Structures are given as structure tokens and as C-alpha cells.
Amino acid sequence: MKTDLFESDHELFGRTVRGFVERHVIHKMEKWDADRLIDRDTWRAAGQQGLLGLAVPEQYGGAGETDYRFRVVIQTEIARVGASALQSGFSTNDDIVLNYLLRHANSEQRDRWLPGFTTGETIGAIAMTEPGAGSDLRSVQTTAVREGEEWVINGSKTFITSGMLADLVIVFAVTDRDLGSRGFSLFVVEDGTPGFTRGRKLDKVGLHAQDTAELFFDNVRVPDANRLGDIGGGFGYLMQSLPLERLGIGIAAQVSAEAVLGWTLDYVKERRAFGKPIGEFQGLGFTLAELQTATEVSRAYIDRCVREYNRGTLTAVDAAKAKLWATELQGKVIDAGVQLHGGYGYMMEYPVAKAFIDARIQRIYGGTNEIMKEIIHRDLMRA
């Protein structure tokens, strides 16, 4: 059963994305992994093709396109070639950083920051996680203290996606510890601001081309004009934006699982043992049947979540379910794909091996899957 999520406009857009992938992605992937970085020319090329900042209003150079299905098309086409790091970078920019700006930036801030998100000139990052504060965001130690019309930021962040390339970073900081969840605010720190430095480029298990960094803030002064939204509104803003972030992760997991399953089916139809294609052996066949069924059923839920998001009715709990289910399924599909490829599945020249190491983070970032279960559990207890 194929997805019925897309219409003719989405299919046409898919051709544009495929053309971009063929011209600007496939031949660069090995270099990106070696450099631990995706070059800025690729971002600019994506901007020229109209693949970035789709939701940016027309007055700032965007398409003003709020139909999230177009973002799903981009995720799908990038997943077909296994470029998970590029997928992660684009999602961080559009589903997370840009989402915060569209929700909370004032008109002056929109004029300053939004145009670059459509051209690929501006790469953004969100700085929440700290060495001692991961899923428990209330325990962050980075502070922002007001001095006149400026805020002085001190602290450090880690595991920051696009941390090395970022032109602007949205920083989650404590502004009044005594106010509990109302004591956090968001600030935009721009590249070149005195006191803002980047640490080492982190050496990760997978997603090698996606630069991930430590960030340090030593008496960083930003004007009040760089405060994003209300003082004390930061924690609430995070809660508002997490459903889209988690839906994006769930979609990435779903389209990755579909791609890997396709690669695996192609392989078992060609690879022969004992005189016949290995896919004809019943043991392998049953595994493939189970995975195909699970993947199609998962797609139905993901599609529903996309439609709910378009309507503005996607709940945080349903987004958590999407992230939990799809990433767990992704792990199962890829693990089986490696196994069914045999020794070749352990060779990095095969995309299934790269998918194996790239996918592990999916069950961790955006809130660990244990946190997703806790969110769902709490909702059940309130019902």
C-alpha cells in the first residue's frame, strides 16, 4: 500500500529535489564525511533551487509555503541516497531554528534574519543541551543577566548540530532561577560576537558530515534587540516547538526505513546462494514480509501526523508517538538490512552500513525515546 499523502504539486516538486540531489549531493557525500562538514556551496545551491525556508513569507524572499508535505518530499528524496547528515542539517534549519523565528521574532528581527534562510546564506543552530543537562532542560546552567539594554550570557552548550557553521545560534538561558519554568528566555547570538567561541568539532559515531560542536559563551553581550520573544517565555516556546522537531525526526526515520528496505530487497533479489536468490529462502522472506508490513503501517500514522500538523492540531503526545515508533522501527529495519547483506552489510561502501551508524542518534536526540515513553505515559494517566 503506497502513501496517499502527496498530490501532483508535491510530485512535481519531488523532481526538482531529485535533480538537486543528483547534481549537488551524491558525488559530494564521501568528501563531506572526510571533512566532517557540508560545504556552504551546497546550502546556496539548495537555496537557489527553492528548497530552503519554504515557510518564510514572500516579503522576506520565501515562498510562504506552510504545507509541510513539501518538507516531507525533501526528506524523502535525500533519504533515497542515504545523505542523512544533509537531511539533519536542513531539518535543523527549517524545522527548528526557522520555526522559532517564525513564531517569535518581531518585525525588525524578521527583516534581519529571515531572508538568509531562503538563500542558504544563513545557517542556524539551537543551543539547548549542556554537558550536565540533556533532556532535563530545567537544569541548564547557562545564564543571561540584563545590564541596561544588553544581556550578558555565560555558559556552555554541547552536541549542537551545525555548531561550527552556524551564522546565528538561538541560546536557551536562565534569566531568573527563582521563577521556575518562567525563568528561561531565548537569545540570538550571531557569529563574530565577542566572547562567543566554538570548541572542538565533535567526533561522532555516525552523521559524520553533520558538524556538531561545543559552544562557549564568556561574557557574551547581546542587545535586547536579540532577545527572542518575551522574557521568561523560553521554556514555553520550547514546548510549543518540540512537536514539529519530533515529527521531523519521525519522518526522517520513516523515509530512511523505507529507503533501506528498498536497498535490501534489491540486494536479496540479486545475491545468490545454493543456486537461487537468497530472498527466496523462507526465513529471509518472513523477515522481509514483517518489515514491509510494519513500515507501511508506520507510514499511515506518520502521514496522519503530517496532516494533523498542517491543520494545526498535532499534539505533543502524538508527535512523541511518531518519534518513538518510527525511530525504533528504523533501527529494526536497518539492523535487518545489515544482516541480510551479510558481510557486505558491514562494509562502508554499501549505503546500508552508513545508514546503520547514522541512524543510532535518532533514538536519542530531540528527547530520548525513554522521554517519549514518559510523555505518552503521563498522558495516559491523565485520561
Image (cartoon, rainbow, N blue to C red):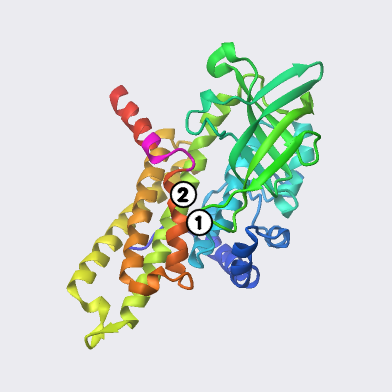
Q: What residue is rendered at 80% in x and 40% in y? A: 192
- In the displayed structure, 92 sits above or below 228; it is below
Quadrant housing the N terminus: bottom left
Q: Are marks 1 and 2 in contact (CB under 8 Å)?
A: yes
Residue 71: x %, y % from top left: 55, 53
User: Is residue 218 left or right of 180 when viewed as pictured?
Assistant: right
Upstream in sequence: badge 1 or badge 2:
1
Residue corresponding to mark 2: 361
The amino acid beneath tag 1 is Gly
Front residue of 102 and 333 = 333
- In the displayed structure, 17 sits above or below 90; it is below
Q: What residue is rendered at 65% in x and 62% in y? A: 35
Give the total number of marks visible in the rendering.
2
The amino acid beneath tag 2 is Ile
Residue 315: x %, y % from top left: 43, 34
State the mark number for residue 288: none
